[in-house]
């Protein structure tokens, strides 16, 4: 079994190396993970300001956003990546007079799905993290007030960790990237707060 897993992951690394898709996957993960975290943060913050006390409303809104982002991300990325890979393969066929290494075809097919999966899962996962406290409220394990606090903290932690990851990718100071992400979150909170005041006025 271990040999099977090693062979599987070795093949994945080969496919990513052949297609040079690692960077693309990382960008999709960060960009869409950021979108998911910010969307959930916006839903939760807006619900808190509006005084929503029914956790089911927040859970359904959050899960609906997760589902929409996940599906649109997956299918959009799959179609875009497939078109790009097809173009690349045709260029290779033309340049090599149809003597393209079969690994190129295998790698392209794998990467189309792999990148789409990253694109679809990253916003879903980062958004769900912030919704978990409200699921606990529905189960009777947490109060709604505590859920708001915990979920917003989780959203900010998620943003901070995405910033740390960005810093690691760029080989720069991850803390600065993390703080920058937190500033974006705080800025978003201010915008939502002022919109609520304006609409409530």
Image (spheres, rainbow, N blue to C red):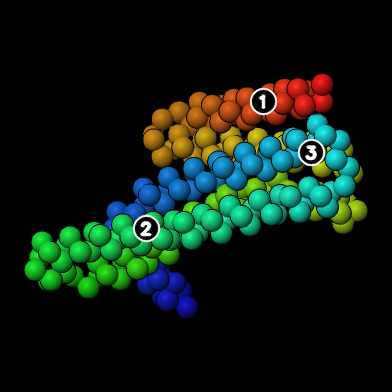
On residue 47, the disc is: 3
Mark pair 3, 1: CA separation: 14 Å
Q: Residues within 10 Å of mark 2 (few under 14, many from 20)?
A: many
Q: Relative to residue 90, is residue 40 depicted above or below? A: above
Asked if residue 57 shows in the view, the reply is yes
Q: Secondary structure at mark 3?
A: helix
Tell me if residue 111 can be seen.
no
Q: Residues within 10 Å of mark 3 (few under 14, many from 20)?
A: some
Pick whichever of labels 3 and 1 is earlier in the sequence: 3
| N-terminal label among 1 and 2 | 2
| Residue at 64% over, 42% down | 39
Q: Residues within 10 Å of mark 1 (few under 14, many from 20)?
A: few
Q: Is residue 179 left or right of residue 28?
A: right
* Up-down relation of residue 132 to residue 183 (above or below): below
Which residue is labeled 2 in the image?
81
- CB under 8 Å between callouts 1 and 2? no
SS for callout 2? helix
Q: What x and y, as percent, mark residue 175?
A: 52, 28
User: What residue sits 82% from the left and 26% below the top?
Assistant: 200
Viewer-nearest residue: 36 or 61: 61
- What residue is pinned by disc 1? 191
Indicate the quadrant containing the C terminus: top left, top right, bottom left or bottom right. top right
Mark 1 vs mark 2, CA separation in Å:
34 Å
Mark 2 vs 3, N-terminal side: 3
Q: Position of residue 53 (x, y in %)?
A: 88, 42
Which percent across, then down, holds residue 108?
Answer: 31, 65
- Residue at 58% x, 34% y is 160
Q: Where does residue 124 sit, x and y in percent of width and height?
A: 61, 53
**Marks 2 and 3, Cα distance to the nearest angstrom?**
36 Å
Tell me which residue sits at (81%, 50%) in the image. Answer: 57
**Does residue 171 appear left or right of residue 60 in this picture?**
left
């Amino acid at each position: 079994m271990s040999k099977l897993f090693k062979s599987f992951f070795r093949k994945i690394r080969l496919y990513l190396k052949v297609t040079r898709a690692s960077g693309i996957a990382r960008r999709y993960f960060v960009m869409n993970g950021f979108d998911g975290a910010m969307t959930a943060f916006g839903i939760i913050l807006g619900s808190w300001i509006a005084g929503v006390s029914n956790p089911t409303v927040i859970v359904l809104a959050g899960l609906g956003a997760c589902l929409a982002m996940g599906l649109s991300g997956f299918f959009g990325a799959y179609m875009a990546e497939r078109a790009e890979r097809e173009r690349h393969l045709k260029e290779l066929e033309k340049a090599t007079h149809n003597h393209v290494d079969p690994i190129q075809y295998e790698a392209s097919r794998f990467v189309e799905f792999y990148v789409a999966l990253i694109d679809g899962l990253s916003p879903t996962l980062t958004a769900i993290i912030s919704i978990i406290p409200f699921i606990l409220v529905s189960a009777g394990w947490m109060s709604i007030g505590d859920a708001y606090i915990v979920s917003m903290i989780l959203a900010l932690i998620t943003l901070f960790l995405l910033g740390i990851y960005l810093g690691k990718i760029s080989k720069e100071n991850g803390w600065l990237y993390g703080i920058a992400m937190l500033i974006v979150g705080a800025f978003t909170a201010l915008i939502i707060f002022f919109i609520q005041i304006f609409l409530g006025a």
